[in-house]
Image (spheres, rainbow, N blue to C red):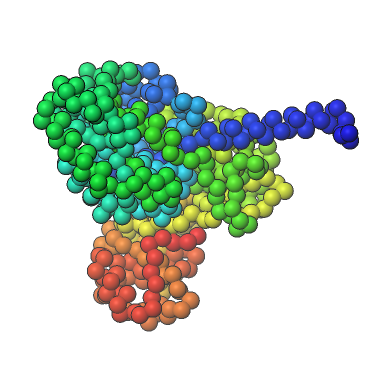
Amino acid sequence: MSDYTMEEKHSMEEKQSMEEKHSREINRRRTFAIISHPDAGKTTLTEKFLLYGGAINLAGSVKGKATARHAVSDWMEIEKERGISVTSSVLQFEYGGYCINILDTPGHQDFSEDTYRTLMAADSAVMVIDASKGVEAQTRKLFKVCGMRGIPIFTFINKLDRDANDTFDLLDEIEKELGIATCPLNWPIGSGKEFRGVYDREKKCVISYSDTEKGTKEGTATEIPIQEEAQLKELIGEEAADKLLGEIELLDGASAEFDLEAVRAGKLTPVCFGSALTNFGVEIFLQHFLNMTTPPLPRVADTGVVEPAGREFSAFVFKIQANMNKAHRDRIAFMRICSGRFDAGMEVRHVQGNRVMRLSQPQTIMADERRILSEAYAGDIIGVFDPGIFSIGDTICMPRENFRYEGIPTFAPEHFARVRQMDTMKRKQFVKGVEQIAQEGAIQIFQEFNTGLEEIIVGVVGVLQFDVLKYRLENEYNVEIRLENLPYEHIRWIENKEEVDIAKLTGTSDMKKVKDMKGNPLLLFVNPWSIGMTLDRNKGLVLSEFGRN
Ligand code: G4P
């Protein structure tokens, strides 16, 4: 006989059903970033995803490119002036029972360290490649960060409605340039004016393309099994059919076996082909993607691995954005929820700040609006009002717990400038401003290795951050500065700084020794050749492209 009273039983059942609900909610979350080089079609693809999710009604009705980017984040004049989005935002929508969070990464060339940090919050990435361009510079950089984390990467080769590079060559380029094996899930039939559709390797049938579908949700694709040769030839033409049959034979003999474990370990990328603009192959890709991705992944903390479900709330700060609302001079700290459920009224511990608090004005930041939220689950991203207490990488957990998530690495800036202050009387504001902006992670600041604070060198991932710094110092701190560009493009952290005598280190004549605000020594280089020379001349020196916080 049970010793529990009816009331106790009832409350246990209630607790169990709540826990089941939480697990269900967490398990249906999919949180990913889209990585691509500008103009590969990231915005167009995202728009089509939203269309399938019913978040918008008609593709094309949403936004022209220019307005889209304004809609995403309209908080800074520079963005308006340049018509680009400086900041990343998150889009949440439902599709097929999944709750999907897309982390947007700024698409313009002038992307920032935030773009990299956003990848720290994702559980997987969709890589969009322009079929006529192949692997491009920004894709390569973003891929490197995803590779470092070993997250699954799903490739969408876009713009098949335009003349494309040879399919085998495209796959070869991905494998060689990015060092990841590829597994095509479908195969394009022609491209440009000759684009006829794709061959689905699993279903072994051809799905025809008709450009009359343009942008509407329901296309009228015809599916024909590959062995129905006569029908196939009628559908796509004799020449295309012969070519396709030859390519499939070659492909089946040569391509890597599909292996879900390898996909999840980030060692094999499933590849789909299509055209985001004319909305061909997008839903097929989305479905494959959702079948293969995982729910929110466990995260590593100093106390061990934290599972997303079956645990209470915890999160880490991956981005801080200042001045979204100019009237309030506020900062928003973006957090990725790693475990459990977040409830708007709950008390939490800010581990690094060593305080228990309530998170103020928790909100989701949608494409064009901020919405106050009452609950969120592991996998979701929330933005909270930050009175200036959070730093990138901080952990938030329940008051009775006390652990820290692994820090977010510092990413290598690629542009450097010396900052000169115009009015030396305003030294205090200047230092305060520069330090605060650096604390938010918008810029990195360095000093000459042997001198004091007098000379400040600023490093940024994207050159736009220089303008942001200048603008913000003028507008928020009333300090005018002049930036003198420096020729360095590469920075390296010294991994074994305890074993190296920095003063005696000999590099090339154009190498510069600096230190960060914590006193860590770093080296600046003009080109990769100098890095190699310096390593050659200083045996035992270990350099790293990422800084540990
Ligand atoms: P991004 O976010 O990766 O920077 O790319 P975006 O989606 O803005 O697309 C860049 C350009 O490429 C846009 O044209 C877009 O219409 C076009 N595009 C995207 N996908 C496809 C595709 O599958 N086929 C073809 N042919 N074009 C595609 P734009 O003229 O620069 O901008 P817009 O004025 O059309 O918005």
Q: In this orientation, does residue 9 appear?
A: yes
Asked if 22 appears above or below 405 in the picture, the reply is above
Could you tell whether 292 is left or right of 255 in the image?
right
Residue in the image at 27% along x and 23% along y: 223
Asked if 334 appears above or below 513 in the picture, the reply is above
Outermost residue to the bottom: 504
Q: Quadrant of residue 200?
A: top left
Could you tell whether 501 is left or right of 37 in the image?
right
Residue 159, image x and y in percent? 22, 33
> Quadrant of the image for the N terminus?
top right
Residue in the image at 72% along x and 48% along y: 400
Residue 123, image x and y in percent? 46, 44
Residue 187, image x and y in percent? 25, 36
The residue lying toward the viewer, choosing from 366 and 431, is 366
Asked if 199 appears above or below 55 in the picture, the reply is below
Residue in the image at 50% along x and 65% along y: 518
Q: In this orientation, does residue 115 appear?
A: no
Count of numbered marks: 0
Could you tell whether 439 is left or right of 541 in the image?
right
The residue lying toward the viewer, choosing from 187 and 17, is 187
Residue in the image at 38% along x and 51% along y: 267
Asked if 347 appears above or below 280 in the picture, the reply is below
Outermost residue to the left: 239
Could you tell whether 42 is left or right of 93 in the image?
left
